[in-house]
Image (cartoon, helix red, strand yellow):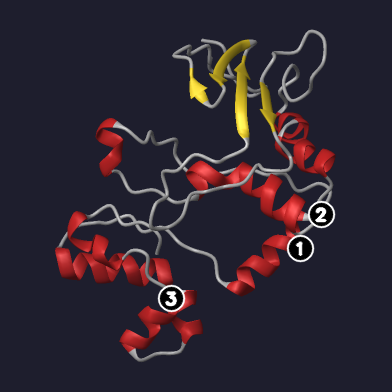
Amino acid sequence: MSAVAEPGARRLAPVLCSESSAERGEPLTATASRADHWILLEYRRLWSREVLPGSGLTDEVKAHLRRQLAVPWVGVCSDAASIAPVGRSLDSPTHPRAYGSFARVLGHYTRELGLLTLPDAVRKMTSLPAQVLGLKDRGLLKEGYWADVVVFDPDTVADTATYDDPKRYPKGIDYVLVNGAVVIDGGHHTGVRPGRVIYGPGKVSA
């Protein structure tokens, strides 16, 4: 468990499945196979309300991830919510992937492990997802396309978020353009918010 929404249960995050299995006196495989179900039932028993646990990666899962990442048609995404490191969001739990998924692909998996070439890593995060989702004018630096551009240093880009401190921006990304407007300039937000809702081919007009 990497994150728990219930304040009274946050002392249990992060917790490894191995720790949970030892506490319950059962095999690790038994705990892992029903972890989500057990976590919810156990927390409801202890605090009589629902909690929202997150999950971390074991060595075995990391090995599977490395194999899958090398598959040409597998893209990169993150299902983590966008949570700001200021204001009310400071009290909201999150997973390190919320801030570090894409930088980790570029730094750890591409530069350090060499699982991907840099062009392929970029493709898996840009043109490939755009093609899969049917977004005809996104994902490429091409005339007539929306200018969504991330300028990063391939020698230094890396994720810095951890389970203990998940709301940390990656390093090595100094400039970001959204729809042609500079949003990150020298590592600092310009205050401009040019983002817009993107609809895929499944949108039905009212």
* Pointer 3 or 1: first along the chain: 3
Foreground residue among 106 and 62: 106
Where is mark 3, residue-wise?
17
Q: Are marks 1 and 2 in contact (CB under 8 Å)?
A: yes
Query: What's the amino acid at mark 2?
Result: Val
Secondary structure type for disc 2: loop
Q: Residues within 10 Å of mark 1 (few under 14, many from 20)?
A: few
Look at mark 2 in the image and give the residue it sits on.
71
Query: Where's residue 199, x and y in %?
Result: 60, 20
Tags 2 and 3 in contact by the CB under 8 Å rule?
no
Relative side of 135 to 186, left or right: right
Residue type at the position of mark 1: Arg
- Count every numbered label the image shows and give the total: 3
Q: Mark 3 to mark 1: distance in Å?
A: 23 Å
The answer to whether 120 appears left or right of 29 in the picture is: right
Q: Is residue 79 among the parts visible in the rendering?
A: no
Q: Do the numbered discs 3 and 1 sit on residues whose CB atoms are within 8 Å?
A: no
